[in-house]
Image (cartoon, rainbow, N blue to C red):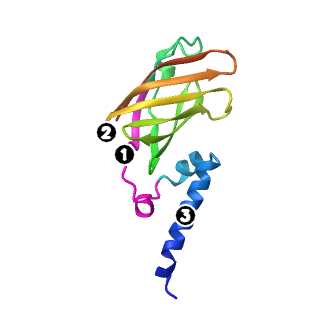
Amino acid sequence: MEYKEFLPVIAFVIVLIIKNLLDLRIMPLFVQYFWWFSARNFLRIKTETIAGQWEQHWESGGSTTFVESTGRHGHPIIKQWAHYCYTETVANQKVYVVFGKIVGEFFIGDWYDKDDLRGYFGTFQLHIKDSKTMEGKWMGHSKTEMTIRCDDWVWKKL
């Protein structure tokens, strides 16, 4: 038997594994460590590419914890696998994970404190204006304050 006979089965198994990763919400780990593995060959996916280093700044939404603008500014590196993107950014000495999916001309997803999943977390929707600019909104909730905040979030590719 030649290995070529098994290629469809291997591709099916890989897609099934990836589907399960998505269902179990462990896809952020997959993208974080396997972003370099091309999905185009197996899934025939064409999507906007936003991988690379960005400068991002988010407005405070009235938060008393993030008053200083420097605490809301960072230079994360986005890792991308197919439609899925992962990055980490630092704000006030805390690492926040940003994980989402490119849907059409939008990058949508979740963000959260890497060390305390229920500490400070929320969602975002960024409009991919072009290959170097994303603008949109974040919405978040903190366990210390029972307030949902929302404000602008701007990303510029470096």
Pointer 1 with pointer 2, Cβ within 8 A: yes
Report the span colored magenta.
36-56
- Foreground residue among 129 and 75: 129
Q: Which mark is residue 14?
A: 3
In the rendered image of this protein, does residue 109 appear above or below residue 31? above
Whole-angstrom CA distance, mark 3 to mark 1, is 22 Å
Spot occupied by residue 84 in the image (x, y as percentages of width and height): 48, 46
Residue receiving disc 2: 131
**Residue that protrudes farthest toward the bottom in the picture:** 1
Residue at 36% across, 37% down: 105
User: What's under tag 2, amino acid-wise?
Assistant: Ser
- Residue 90 falls inside the magenta stretch: no
Q: Which numbered disc flags the more N-terminal residue, 3 or 1? A: 3
**Residue that protrudes farthest toward the left in the picture:** 130
Are there few (<14), some (14-19), or many (20+) residues within 10 Å of tag 3? some
- Foreground residue among 123 and 155: 123
Residue receiving disc 1: 49
User: What's under tag 1, amino acid-wise?
Assistant: Thr
Circle 1 SS class? loop
Residue at 68% across, 29% down: 118
Q: Which mark is residue 25?
A: none
Circle 2 SS class? loop
